[in-house]
Image (tube, rainbow, N blue to C red):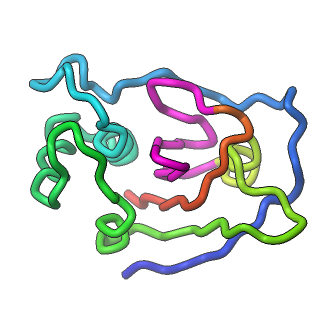
Amino acid sequence: MTTFTEVTPASIQPASFTFPFTRSDAGRSLSKRPKQKNDCTVRALATARAMDYDLAYDILAEAGRKCAKGFHIGQWLEKQPGVKKIAFPAKKGQSRMNPLTFAKQFPTGRYICRTAKHVYCVIDGAVFDTVKPRHNRCIYTAWEIKA
């Protein structure tokens, strides 16, 4: 069962604030598919669930993800047990959620965060991805992944 929570960022964080970042391909380079492209959903799932890249790839392929194509992971995640959706809607006069604010407001737990055309994993306030996101990149939705 998925629950829905609405969260608003507390305030705009200064550009000098940094958040922890770990460069990770979630095991893709050691997998059967080391040259995959457009696989951020696979990497995010593998990292958030601490699972093998190939297993995450196969799970999402079974759910309809096509090789080297984007996948709307949100609809799939919301059907999974132990997943809690957290929305960050735009509100007039308030800044959008971004990685800086997210790291401060959610310092513990495992999350998959969705931005425009990209998803990545956050574990205990640290971003895990192949490229560090811009500090001001809007996070539209996050899903807390319970073990």
Left or right of 62, for residue 99 = right
* Towards the viewer: 124 or 2: 2
Q: In which quadrant of the rendered image does the C terminus lie?
A: bottom left
Q: In this view, does 44 lie above or below 97?
A: above
Residue 99, percent across and down? 67, 42
Residue 136, percent across and down? 73, 40
Is the stretch drawn in magenta largely helix, strand or loop? strand
Q: Which residue is drawn at 59% across and 59% down?
A: 140
Q: Residue at x 47, y 42 (%)?
A: 121
Q: In which quadrant of the rendered image does the N terminus lie?
A: bottom left
Q: Is residue 49 magenta?
A: no
Residue 14, percent across and down? 90, 36
* Towards the viewer: 103 or 94: 94
In magenta, the rendered stretch is 108-133
Q: Which residue is drawn at 53% across and 49% down?
A: 116
Residue 66, percent across and down? 15, 47
